[in-house]
Image (spheres, rainbow, N blue to C red):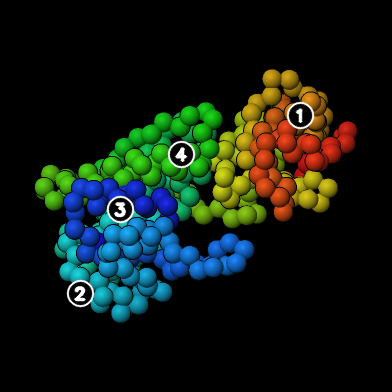
Amino acid sequence: MFMGTPDFAVPSLEALLAAGHGIAAVVTGADKPRGRGQRLTPTPVKVVALRERLPLLQPASVKDPAFAAALRDFKPDLAVVVAFRILPRGVFSIPAYGSFNLHASLLPRYRGAAPINWALINGDQETGVTTFFLDDAVDTGNTLLQERLPIGPDDDAGVVHDRLAALGAHVVAETVRRIEAGTLTAQPQDNTQATPAPKIFREQCRISWTSPVGQIRNFVRGLSPHPAAWTMHRGRLLKIYATRLSSSPLTGLPGTLHSDAGRLSVTACDGTLDILELQQEGHRRMPAEEFLRGYSIAPGDQLA
């Protein structure tokens, strides 16, 4: 049985199908209204399930006894969970061989909802994926397999997300193969090495221009493209998607804007960053050069 909802889960489901595993059922989130017309749209995992004509469940609550009863009717051997919900023991203990989850970090590092974002915000040069058996506490179960992935200096969360989704699909398929073969031994996590990766809310995404340039750059990378780091200029919200360390440092108080020949720069406490891509509220994302063709910057303007 496969449980997952967003794009991140799709490669894992497709890898299991390609490996010839029988999918008893797919469990995914509810359809949600999207776009200007707020049209109900199926989850990416549901799209695959419908394409492959797989039995599909979309429970309103994973704690509903009727949901657990429906799962038991399928008599699953194993449940594979990728970017779904926190499951109660009454659900994850149903499969004969248990339930395992794919997590986008090298557990026990970055337990929580936003492991990719926090790894980049903290300037890590390496991340990875882990499969582990589900337990009562979130992301604490015994680990099965891990694979590492280097983080490039210019990678953002979107790039790392896509690479980890592909790497995770391979690890998921290999985990199932080795569970089936009886050649995999689960290992307990070292809780003393655990670090948190809590969900990130909009108010946490505001850039502090009094921070060092390297820290700001990692903050922007870690939040790009979603939920996106932001700042304010003349009462307008600006989302910042990409920056680089400036080769021509400028002077001014932290947050001071400079524009010259299509280049948009801002000072921090210890240097200058060039803003490469940004988005004004109500407009589309665009390169700084294009942005400056329709947006004026006055001498001494400040970001806040």
* 2 shown above or below 62: above
Mark 3 to mark 2 CA distance (whole Å) = 21 Å
Q: Which residue is drawn at 34% across and 57% down?
A: 48
Question: In the image, residue 219 lies at what x, y percent?
Answer: 60, 39
Q: How far apart are marks 2 and 1 (CA)?
A: 63 Å
Residues tagged 1 and 4 counted as in contact (Cβ below 8 A): no
Name the residue beneath numbered marker 4. Answer: 160
Q: Earlier in the sequence, mark 2 or mark 1?
A: 2
Q: Rounded to the nearest whole Å, what is the CA distance between mark 1 and mark 3?
A: 45 Å
What is the x, y in percent for residue 206? 67, 47
Pick the residue in front: 303 or 161: 161
- Residues at circles 4 and 3 in contact by the CB criterion of under 8 Å: no
Residue 117 point in image, percent of width and height:
51, 44
| Residue carrying label 2 | 73
Look at mark 3 in the image and give the residue it sits on: 13
- Judged by depth in the image, the label closer to the viewer, 1 or 4, is 1
Residue 174 pos. (x, y %):
22, 44
Q: For label 3, count other residues whose C-alpha is less than 10 Å away and answer few (under 14), some (14-19) or many (20+).
A: many
Marks 2 and 4, Cα distance to the nearest angstrom? Answer: 38 Å
Residue drawn at x 57%, y 38% as measured from the top left: 221
Of the 4 image quadrants, the one containing the N terminus is: bottom left
Circle 2: residue type: Asp
Left or right, 127 with reference to 100: right
